[in-house]
Image (cartoon, grey):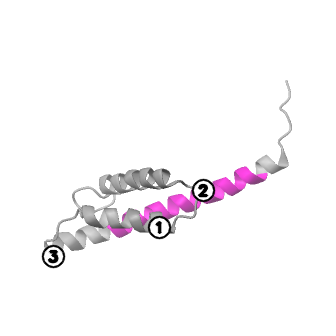
């Protein structure tokens, strides 16, 4: 049985999606590194790591700047996950987790 031909538009769009996925990965890793630096600094100066008010402000600010097509609910869900993931990855010692 032969494989069906691949539509060139499908190939092109999949390539673009892969490029965006790699960019997302790079940005998430950069965010985790920055949060790890922030946690280490806060630990050094005796500040609490978690700041729920800051998290709410961040999501509210992003919601105000979101032009879509991501919905407001989708944005809140995405950032709830991203913030939780970041906290887990940074861990208690302020260092990013292993790759």
- Provide residue 26's location: percent of width, then percent of height: 51, 63
Judge from the rendering whether residue 92 lies leftward or rightward of residue 87; answer left or right.
Answer: left
Q: Quadrant of residue 48?
A: bottom left
Res 45 label: 3
CA gap between label 1 and label 3 equals 32 Å
Q: Nearer the viewer, mark 1 or mark 3?
A: 1
The mark lying in front, picked from 3 and 2, is 2
Residue stretch in magenta: 12-35
Location of residue 75 in the rendering, given as x and y in whole percent from the top left corner: 47, 55
What percent of the width, then of the height, locates residue 27?
49, 64
The front one of 66 and 6 is 66
Residue pictured at 57% horizontal, 62% vertical: 23
Location of mark 1 (residue): 64
How many C-alpha atoms fall within 10 Å of the one at disc 3: few (<14), some, or many (≥20)? few
Q: Earlier in the sequence, mark 2 or mark 1?
A: 1
Q: Are marks 1 and 3 in contact (CB under 8 Å)?
A: no
Distance from disc 3 to disc 2, alpha carbons, whole Å, reads 41 Å
Q: Which mark is residue 43?
A: none
Residue 94 drawn in magenta: no
Q: Earlier in the sequence, mark 3 or mark 2?
A: 3
Which quadrant would residue 86 be assigned to in this image?
bottom left
Q: Which residue is mark 2?
A: 69
Q: Is residue 17 magenta?
A: yes
Furthest residue toward left: 46
Magenta part, dominant SS:
helix
User: In the rendered image, is residue 99 in sight?
Assistant: no
Q: Is residue 8 above or below residue 34?
A: above
């Amino acid at each position: 049985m032969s494989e069906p031909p691949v539509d060139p538009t499908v190939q092109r769009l999949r390539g673009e999606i892969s490029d965006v996925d790699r960019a997302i990965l790079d940005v998430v890793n950069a965010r985790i590194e920055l949060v790890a630096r922030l946690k280490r600094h806060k630990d050094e100066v005796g500040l609490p790591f978690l700041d729920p008010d800051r998290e709410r402000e961040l999501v509210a600010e992003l919601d105000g700047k979101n032009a879509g097509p991501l919905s407001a609910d989708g944005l809140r869900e995405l950032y709830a996950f991203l913030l939780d993931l970041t906290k887990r990855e940074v861990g208690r010692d302020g260092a990013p987790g292993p790759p």
